[in-house]
Image (cartoon, rainbow, N blue to C red):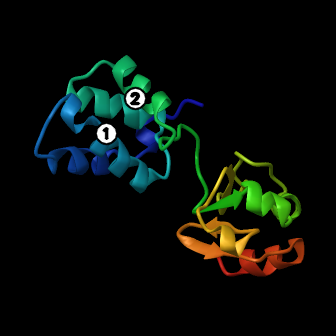
């Protein structure tokens, strides 16, 4: 997916880079993190602008972005749902919760709803086995769930 530079406001990129105390490669990861926070993903035109302003080859930028799982090249939802599929959650019904999420959102794990409201991910562990089965929406935990609980969880996030 190629964006046109005129379709994106690149002023935030300029502001983020200008606020850095370092330049070049030393600034790259913090710049990518802040830019992604702004756009919710890293559009191609934005990566090109970062490369130009930091005077780095675009291939270096892509190397970093594709190496670290925290960076995303496709649009993400306003809310990220992480469904735990670890041992405790699996044993206590985590698959049923994931299935209910997939049906309610009409997407699979790793996908984003067309309205950009939710991105659904599965994780190996959320570190809250006592709440199994559990999920997180953004930074909020929900536990001891059943598939029937999914709709009420989703309703809390507009």
Q: Percent position (x, y) of residue 131?
A: 69, 74
What residue is shown at x 48% (from left), y 41% (from top)?
71
Sort mark 1 into few (<14), some (14-19) or many (20+) by Cα contacts within 10 Å: some
In the figure, residue 156 lies in which quadrant?
Answer: bottom right
Q: Quadrant of the N terminus?
A: top right
On screen, residue 89 versus residue 28, left or right, reads right
The one nearer the camera, 114 or 92, is: 92
Q: Which residue is mark 2?
A: 64
Which residue is at a point 26% across and 27% down the rendered structure image? Answer: 52
At label 2, counting other C-alpha atoms closer than 10 Å, the crowd grade (few under 14, some 14-19, many 20 or more) is some
Percent across and percent down for residue 129 are 67, 67
Marking on residue 113: none
The image position of residue 56, as x and y in percent, is 25, 22
Q: Which residue is mark 1?
A: 29
Horizontal arrangement in the rendering, residue 100 relative to residue 125 (left or right): right
- Quadrant position of the C terminus in the picture: bottom right
**Image position, residue 151 (x, y; %):** 81, 76
Instruction: Decide: is 24 above or below 81.
Output: above
Query: Which type of secondary structure does the marked residue at label 2 adopt?
Result: helix
Above or below, comparing residue 147 to residue 12 in the picture: below
* Disc 1 from disc 2: Cα separation: 8 Å
Which mark is first along the chain, 2 or 1?
A: 1
Label 1: state its secondary structure: helix
State the residue at coordinates (29%, 43%).
31
Asked if residue 116 is positioned above or below residue 133 in the image, the reply reads: above
Question: CB under 8 Å between callouts 1 and 2?
Answer: yes
Quarter-of-image position of residue 49: top left
Question: What residue is drawn where x is 48% and y is 38%?
Answer: 43
């Amino acid at each position: 997916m190629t964006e046109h530079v005129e379709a994106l406001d690149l002023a935030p990129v300029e502001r983020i880079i200008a606020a850095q105390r370092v330049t070049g490669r030393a600034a790259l990861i913090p710049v990518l993190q802040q830019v992604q926070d702004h756009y919710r993903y890293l559009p191609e035109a934005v990566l090109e602008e970062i490369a130009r302003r930091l005077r780095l080859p675009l291939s270096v930028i892509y190397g970093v972005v594709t190496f670290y799982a925290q960076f995303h090249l496709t649009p993400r939802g306003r809310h990220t749902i992480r469904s735990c599929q670890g041992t405790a959650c699996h044993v206590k019904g985590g698959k049923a919760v994931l299935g209910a999420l997939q049906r309610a959102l009409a997407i699979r794990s790793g996908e984003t709803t067309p309205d950009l409201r939710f991105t659904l991910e599965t994780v190996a562990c959320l570190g809250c086995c006592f709440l199994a089965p559990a999920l997180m929406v953004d930074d909020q935990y929900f536990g001891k769930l059943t598939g029937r609980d999914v709709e009420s969880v989703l309703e809390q996030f507009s």
